[in-house]
Image (cartoon, rainbow, N blue to C red):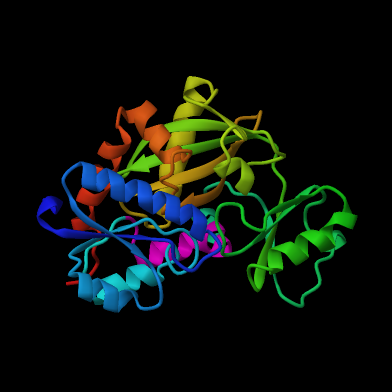
Amino acid sequence: MMKSKKIGVLFGGLSAEREVSLKSGAAVHQALVAQGYNAVAIDVGRDLADVLKREGVEAVFIALHGRYGEDGCVQGLLELLQIPYTGSGVLASALAMHKRFSKQSFAASEILTAPFRCYRRGETVNVANLPFGLPLVVKPVQEGSSVGVAIVKEETQLATALEEAFRYDDEILVEQYIKGQEVQVGILNDTPIGAIEIIPKNEFYDFEAKYTDGMAEHIFPARLEPSLYKKAQQIGLAAHRALGCNGYSRVDLLVTPDGDCYVLEVNTLPGMTALSLLPEIAAKGAGLSFEALVSRIIESASFSIKVN
């Protein structure tokens, strides 16, 4: 159905994840063109509305990451312009991007997530006043790809971690460090399609490990007992639904030796690069090539629009 429309692939953008988005967008655009779609690549700037009108775009594949693309801003613009788009709507995108509100949504749905506290710029963070001790994790409230994230093992490391996190946001989240397997669940059209385990070369699955070849080992399926594997997928889907997500997502979990599955976050616009996890999960778990995955996602765009 979408092959009769002109599709705009939105990539690049204005966030700290611009370079990753450029790679995602290039891969998506190439896959669409190879399958006969009429697709144009659009590096997103503040003149996006004008560009969409000038290009005559009739549907959009959003390959943006981070602020102004993954947080509901672009989704709202597209709804005003009545242009169908891929992925989740305005509210789900905003909730998923904001770690405090997403964790509160998980808790309201009785989904396990690490205990946390949030602080705004200028407030004092005192380890002694936290309901959990060291080690802990410090992260900006509204960034992705582990940008600005640090693990604090000693109190002397806290000031540096806070300074780094506040570089990216005026509000930061401090949460209890959970030791466990890093497992990520792929969701496509409201169905779990598999769970992959990540073993990073660095201390955790940080920006370098995510986007540098050889910096992380991917194991599919994740090394979990069958019942726990099923549980991880069910919790991934529950987190996706708790935020009201649509189309597709990737849910990041920590699975403890006791079998507890802690949800870290839901990525409503997961990476679509050669090293990205959702395409790998789709290929190994659902037998979908990268091109087939891209096609499935764009064909769902007509059902993503939220206007009358």
The residues colored magenta run 87-103
Above or below, 176 relative to 194 = below
Q: 118 or 137: which is nearer to us? A: 137
Q: Residue at x 25, y 37 (%)?
A: 292
Left or right: residue 170 versus residue 210 is right
Q: Residue at x 41, y 43 (%)?
A: 237
Residue 93 is covered by the magenta coloring: yes
Q: Residue at x 22, y 42 (%)?
A: 34
Residue 200: quarter of image: top right
Left or right: residue 76 versus residue 117 is left
Left or right: residue 268 versus residue 4 is right
Of helix, strand and loop, which mostly describes the magenta segment? helix
Q: Residue at x 65, y 49 (%)?
A: 114
Rendered location of residue 128, percent (x, y) = 87, 60
- On the question of residue 262 being in view, the answer is no
Rendered location of residue 238, percent (x, y) = 42, 46
Rendered location of residue 95, percent (x, y) = 47, 63
Above or below, 171 relative to 36 = below
Q: 264 or 162: which is nearer to us? A: 162
Q: 209 or 182: which is nearer to us? A: 209
Left or right: residue 199 versus residue 97 is right
How many circles with numbers are drawn on the protein? 0
Most extreme residue toward the top is 225
